[in-house]
Image (tube, rainbow, N blue to C red):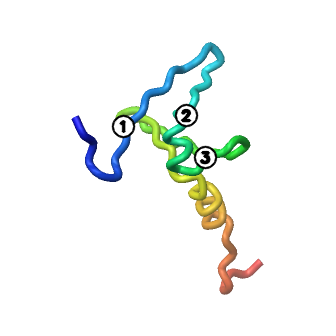
Amino acid sequence: MKAPKGKNAWTATVGEKGQIVIPKQARELFDIRPGDTLLLLGDEKRGIAIPPKGAFAELFGMAFEEKEDEEL
């Protein structure tokens, strides 16, 4: 079965310490490197999602962004 363009699936095994290894193809595709911090989002019904690695910084920036018209 061939995956649709731009769609991928991989498997990972959970180790004794609860760690998983992201497959090499996925790391290369998404430019994930040692020391990177990844954000994991979980939904009990839909599962776990790992957004692009820049999403954390963008979300953090939006959450703490100061608006020009805000009074301190």
Image location (x, y in percent) of residue 48: 46, 37
Foreground of the two, 17 or 13: 13
- Quarter-wise, where is residue 66 in the image? bottom right
Residue at numbered disc 2: 22
Residue at image point 66% right, 86% down: 69
Image location (x, y in percent) of residue 62: 61, 67
The crowding category of the residue bearing disc 2, from other C-alpha atoms within 10 Å (few below 14, some 14 to 19, many at least 20), is some
Residue at numbered disc 3: 32
Report helix, strand or loop for mark 3: loop
Residue at numbered disc 1: 46
Given the current orientation, which residue lies at the most extreme right position? 72
Numbered mark located on residue 71 in the image: none
Q: Type of residue at label 2? A: Ile
**Mark before the other along the chain sequence, 2 or 3:** 2
- The alpha-carbon separation of the residues under discs 1 and 2 comes to 20 Å
From this view, report whether residue 12 is shown above or below residue 40.
above
Q: Type of residue at label 3? A: Ile
Q: Type of residue at label 1? A: Arg
From this view, report whether residue 6 is shown above or below residue 72.
above
Foreground of the two, 54 or 72: 54
